[in-house]
Amino acid sequence: GGMVQRLGIAQAMLHRPPILFLDEPPSALDPSGRYELLTLIESLRGEITIFLSSHILADIERVCDTVAIINQGQLIRVENRDVLLNEFTTNRIHLEVHRASLPQVSTLLTELENQTWLNRVVQDDDKLDLTVRNNEFAQAEILPLLAAHNIQINRLEWKRPSLEEIFLTLSQESS
């Protein structure tokens, strides 16, 4: 199945068409074949307009610039991928503190308690999960606060749902 799938994709791309329609292109491919195909699709950005239909929303999230969400035959939403993902960003920050900075975390936590933009902080060893009231203020304040306390971080991530979670939310709202 995988070789037939690869052959079909190669035939479709052979003459570099300006527009290409692909329906579930990574199906029947092994993990390395999927990776190679998605990398190829990414490399064609700006050269070929590709309409990619797939139920594997992680693939769509990885390679598509614009996303159309269809539920039960109805077009629910067409949006730039990043705009859509940012719209559903939650009000949570996940912070992983470098081990060398753990002694400074207690003073950081004390100062965080006085921040009006913060609802709560949960600490689990070197990980902090912050729930914020106001994303804008939190985005502007969190890094300067960490720097002021000499906190080295391994990771700072705004929690945002996957495209799959967004699809489920939007499809439930439209039902």
Image: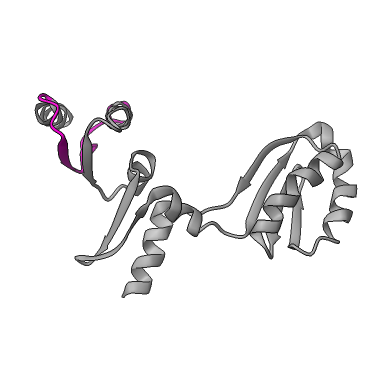
Q: Name, please, the residue furthest toward the bottom.
A: 175
Picture quadrant of residue 11: top left
Q: In the picture, which quadrant includes the N terminus? A: top left
Q: In the picture, which quadrant includes the C terminus? A: bottom left
Q: Residue at x 16, y 38 (%)?
A: 20
Total residue callouts: 0
Name the spot of residue 137 as percent of width and height, x first: 71, 57
Q: Is residue 146 magenta?
A: no
Residue 158's place in the image compared with 153, above or below, is below
Name the spot of residue 141 as percent of width and height, x first: 75, 51
What secondary structure predominates along the stretch shown in magenta? loop
Name the spot of residue 125 as percent of width and height, x first: 77, 45
Name the spot of residue 81 as percent of width and height, x first: 39, 49
Q: 25 left or right of 65?
A: left
> How is the protein colored in the picture?
one colour
Q: Residue at x 79, y 34 (%)?
A: 99
Q: Is residue 18 magenta?
A: yes
Query: Magenta segment range?
Result: 14-33
